[in-house]
Image (spheres, rainbow, N blue to C red):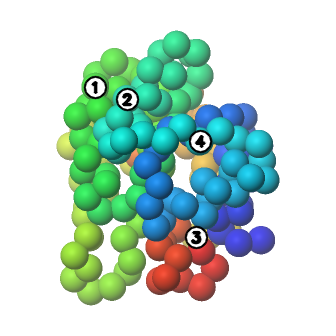
Amino acid sequence: MKTYQLAAQSLSECGVGTIFGLMGDVNLAYLGDFVENHGGEFVAAVAEGGAVSMADGYARMTGGVGVASVTHGPAVTNCTTALVEAVRSRSAVLLLTGGTPDVRDHFQDLDLEGFARLTGAEYRRVRKADAVGADIAEALARVAATRVPLRAGSALRPARSCGDG
């Protein structure tokens, strides 16, 4: 099974029914699989911060975990204000982002852990493709238990820079 399929399956198996976000080269495959093969709903946002705000509102209204997904690089920085609001409100929000291609001096490279720390959110990085399912389950459980938003970076890379998506 490909990495993006494992991610979609894990989200579904963990009870995620709705993901708010803005699609990009990193999250397109798993979001498509989540909707097409697992019956999930994707609610598109106009901007990345809006996706996090929608996940925040969802968490506050349902008492569950709100999940947002954006691509890498500047898309992550566009989530700053909304993520700070979710942190200060102790909302159960999981922000899934992809990783920038592992290329020297990539123009969209960003210290994702530093970004999470700046906002007050926790950070987890999926380092191995075969661990994506367990890592998503752990992140969802952590957010639900602590009500501290978590920014999860993953082994998912833009499709053009890895062999299995």
Figure check: 146 above or below 29: above
Q: Find the distance from the CA under tag 1 to the CA under tag 2.
A: 8 Å
Q: Kindly report which numbered mark, 3 or 4, lies closer to the viewer in this rendering.
A: 4
> How many numbered marks appear?
4
Figure check: 38 above or below 125: above
Residue 128: mark in rendering = 3
Q: Position of residue 109 (x, y in %)?
A: 26, 70
Check contact, mark 2 vs mark 4: CB within 8 A.
Answer: no
Check contact, mark 3 vs mark 4: CB within 8 A.
Answer: no
**Going from the N terminus, do you reach mark 2 or mark 4 first?**
4
Residue 85: mark in rendering = 1
Q: Find the distance from the CA under tag 1 to the CA under tag 3.
A: 31 Å
Residue 42: mark in rendering = 4
Q: Kindly report which numbered mark, 2 or 4, lies closer to the viewer in this rendering.
A: 4
Q: Residues within 10 Å of mark 1 (few under 14, many from 20)?
A: some
Q: Kindly report which numbered mark, 1 or 2, lies closer to the viewer in this rendering.
A: 2
Q: Secondary structure at mark 4?
A: strand
Q: Which residue is mark 2?
A: 53
Left or right: where does residue 64 sit relative to residue 134?
Answer: left
**Going from the N terminus, do you reach mark 3 or mark 4 first?**
4
Viewer-closest of 105 and 142: 105
Q: Kindly report which numbered mark, 4 or 1, lies closer to the viewer in this rendering.
A: 4
Quadrant in the rendering for residue 57: top left
Viewer-closest of 144 and 51: 51
Query: Measuring 59% from the left and 74% from the top, which residue is drawn there?
Result: 165
